[in-house]
Amino acid sequence: METIGGRVKESDIDFKIALNRETVEEDGIEANIEIEEFITSTYATTFDDRYNKEQTWIYIVYKGKLKSGKLRMQCRISV
């Protein structure tokens, strides 16, 4: 399973803007989510079978509130 996330684009003012944009892209525009305070961050290295190489990740966790609408949860399982 995969968490919501993606790259920070040059047009993103900060991580909160990037997270909000990625949430809309991955969970759909049906959800109006307010990104609140920063909680924690962590660093990890994983192996990407698609590209046959290691990738490094930084996970930044924020508290969020679903203000209206609903989340469209997707489950991707790689075998």
Image (tube, helix red, strand yellow):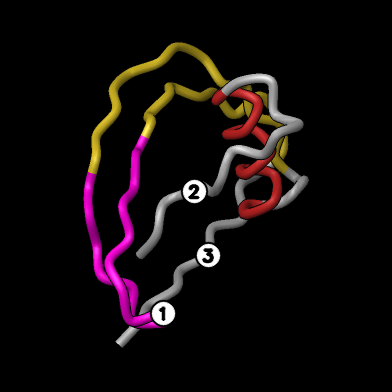
Q: Position of residue 36 (x, y in %)?
A: 51, 14
31 in magenta: no
Q: Nearer the viewer, mark 2 or mark 3?
A: 2
Disc 1 marks a residue whose amino acid type is Tyr
The residue at 56%/45% (across/down) is 7
Q: Are marks 2 and 3 in contact (CB under 8 Å)?
A: no
Checking the image for residue 1, the label placed there is: none
Q: Is residue 31 above or below residue 50?
A: above
Chain-order first, disc 2 or disc 3: 2
> Which residue is tagged 1?
51
- Magenta range is 44-59
Query: Could you tell me residue 63's position as x and y percent?
Result: 43, 22
How much space separates mark 2 and mark 3, taking CA atoms?
10 Å
Which residue in the protein does label 3 denote? 74
Contact between marks 1 and 2 (CB within 8 A): the answer is: no
Q: Check whether the beta carbons of the residues at disc 1 and disc 3 lie within 8 A of each other.
A: no
Circle 2: element type: loop
Given the image, on which type of amino acid does mark 3 rest? Gln
Mark positioned earlier in the residue sequence (1 or 2): 2
Closest to the observer, 15 or 67: 15
Task: Identify the secondary structure beneath mark 1.
Answer: loop
Q: Which residue is mark 2?
A: 4
Give the residue at the far bottom of this rendering.
79
If you read the primary sequence from the N terminus, does the residue marked by circle 1 or circle 3 appear first? 1
Q: Position of residue 1 (x, y in %)?
A: 35, 65
